Image (cartoon, rainbow, N blue to C red):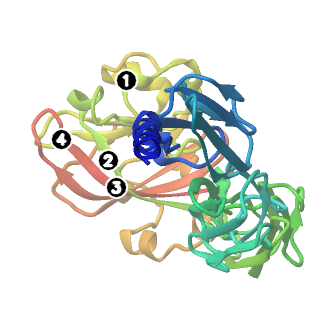
């Protein structure tokens, strides 16, 4: 009996020692996705929290590396979208335990799209959206001031933009967990607006028949043009800019129709061409005294319709000068008009290529009858054409500022007759001048 008890005590002690030497194994780990981004490529950092183990075997399905026997393995890269298992087997000489986990890597997203403006870039415009995004599962489009203003379609329908200027198109794409955005801008030109100017030729500033003008196109965003005007001759009816000739007096409607491939619009302007009076009227012409020949100017050209100073005189301008005014001083006690070819006799430098003009400075000293009232009432050249100005002209006559207004008659070497109405003697020292209106026959 005593022997049995001793054996029992020995077995109990042995079993107790065995239990005390056996170490339980618990396989445990955590996985952290770097930057919390689950979009491929993904890098996973692992932390081994196992207990009781001496040996480890990691398996990284689809990862790089694919396995490891280190307690603390390096980070693992997952380059493709998918669902993957991470398995850790931990053991010692007596125990073994396994833990595994599953996680998903989302597809990589490359957000991009193109915009194609249909027909041309003039507003209004239809814009085609070409989605080249890869890896996304959902889409959110925003079309700034467009119709429609948004879409969730992968390939949205064309968008209509009504106004000119910059318009932003934005896309936010998602792979289910993360979103990615990009935007592009289109710039639309102004919509078509039709307008034009009528610019009379130099000799037709008075809108008298026959009338010639340049039609200057002011259209915005036009591509093709068509000019029309009944009973008028248009040089090139489809040109951007062209000339128009109207032979007879009357009222005319000039129209321009412009198109840009999207819209066609027409603008019209009405003009009245007056009967030909064969008379030009120039108002408020200033002619300086002798001391103002370099500033105000003492010479006048009928063909150029401008005052010429001595400083601007050259051979071309000299041949066009018709009138020369001489005023002795600011007191206007000795004034007269003289012929360009006689300018040197009045103290001026000789006029190059000078022509001859005949003047009547004092009509009251001639048999002719022509008054300031006649000047004011003269609307055509009927009266001028009857006057023998050349035969009644005389050199050496002059006038003062006592009688105002005063009329002076002239006839050029080319036979153009005219009258000067002196309506003011303006005394401003060396810059003094007479203020005149001039009426003369057309060439």
Compute the Cα span from label 1 to label 2: 15 Å
- Calculate the distance from the C-alpha at mark 4 to the C-alpha at mark 1: 16 Å
Write down the residue under mark 1: 310
State the SS at label 2.
Answer: strand
Q: Earlier in the sequence, mark 2 or mark 3?
A: 2
| Nearest the eye: 321 or 37 | 37
Q: Kindly report the distance in space between the C-alpha atoms of the residues bearing marks 3 and 4.
A: 13 Å
Compared across the picture, whether 22 is left or right of 63 comes to left
Q: Is residue 209 left or right of residue 183?
A: right
Disc 2 to disc 3, how far (Cα)? 6 Å
Classify mark 1: helix, strand or loop: helix
- Image quarter of residue 130: bottom right
Q: Nearer the viewer, residue 316 or 75?
A: 75
Task: Give the numbered dot on residue 47.
Answer: none
State yes or no: discs 1 and 2 in contact (Cβ < 8 Å).
Answer: no
Cβ atoms at labels 2 and 3 below 8 Å apart = yes
Q: Which labelled disc corresponds to residue 432?
A: 4
Residue 286 image label: 2
Residue 436 is tagged as: 3
Please determine whether, in this image, residue 409 is positioned above or below residue 34.
below
**Mark 3–mark 1 distance (CA, rounded to whole Å):** 20 Å
Upstream in the sequence, badge 4 or badge 1?
Answer: 1
Q: Is residue 394 visible?
A: no
**Is 335 placed left or right of 190 in the picture?**
left
Name above or below for residue 183 compared with residue 142: above
């Amino acid at each position: 009996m005593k022997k049995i008890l001793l054996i029992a005590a020995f077995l109990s002690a042995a079993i107790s020692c065995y239990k005390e030497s056996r170490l339980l194994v618990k396989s445990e780990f955590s996985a952290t996705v770097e930057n919390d981004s689950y979009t491929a490529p993904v890098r996973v950092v692992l932390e081994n929290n196992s207990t009781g183990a001496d040996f480890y075997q990691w398996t990284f399905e689809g990862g790089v590396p694919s396995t490891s026997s280190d307690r603390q393995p390096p980070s693992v890269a997952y380059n493709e979208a998918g669902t993957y298992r991470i398995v850790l087997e931990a053991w010692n000489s007596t125990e073994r335990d396994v833990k595994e986990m599953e996680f998903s890597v989302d597809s990589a997203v490359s957000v991009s799209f193109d915009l194609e403006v249909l027909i041309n870039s003039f507003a209004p415009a239809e814009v085609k959206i070409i989605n080249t995004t890869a890896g996304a599962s959902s889409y959110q489009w925003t079309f700034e001031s467009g119709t429609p203003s948004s879409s969730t379609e992968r390939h949205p329908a064309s968008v209509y933009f009504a106004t000119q200027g910059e318009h932003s198109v934005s896309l936010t794409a998602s792979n289910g967990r993360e979103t990615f955005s990009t935007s592009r801008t289109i710039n639309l030109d102004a919509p078509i607006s039709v307008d034009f100017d009528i610019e009379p030729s130099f000799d037709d500033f008075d809108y008298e028949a026959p009338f010639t003008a340049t039609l200057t196109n002011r259209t915005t965003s036009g591509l093709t043009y068509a000019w029309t005007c009944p009973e008028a001759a248009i040089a090139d009816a489809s040109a951007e800019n062209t000339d128009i000739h109207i032979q007879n007096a009357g009222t005319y409607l000039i129209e321009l129709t412009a198109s840009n491939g999207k819209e066609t619009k027409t603008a019209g302007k009405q003009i009245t061409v007056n009967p030909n009076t064969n008379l030009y009227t120039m108002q408020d012409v200033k002619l300086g005294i002798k001391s103002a020949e370099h500033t105000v100017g003492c010479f006048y050209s009928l063909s150029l319709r401008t005052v010429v100073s001595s400083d601007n005189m050259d051979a071309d301008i000299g041949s066009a000068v018709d009138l020369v005014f001489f005023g002795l001083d600011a007191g206007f006690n000795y004034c007269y008009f003289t012929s360009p070819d006689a300018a040197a006799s009045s103290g001026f430098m000789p006029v190059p290529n000078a022509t001859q003009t005949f003047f009547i400075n004092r009509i009251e000293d001639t048999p002719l009858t022509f008054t300031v009232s006649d000047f004011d009432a003269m609307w055509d050249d009927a009266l001028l054409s009857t006057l023998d100005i050349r035969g009644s002209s005389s050199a050496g006559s002059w006038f003062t500022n006592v009688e105002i207004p005063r009329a002076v008659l002239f006839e050029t070497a080319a036979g153009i007759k005219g009258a000067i109405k002196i309506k003011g003697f303006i005394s401003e020292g060396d810059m003094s001048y007479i203020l005149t209106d001039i009426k003369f026959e057309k060439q």
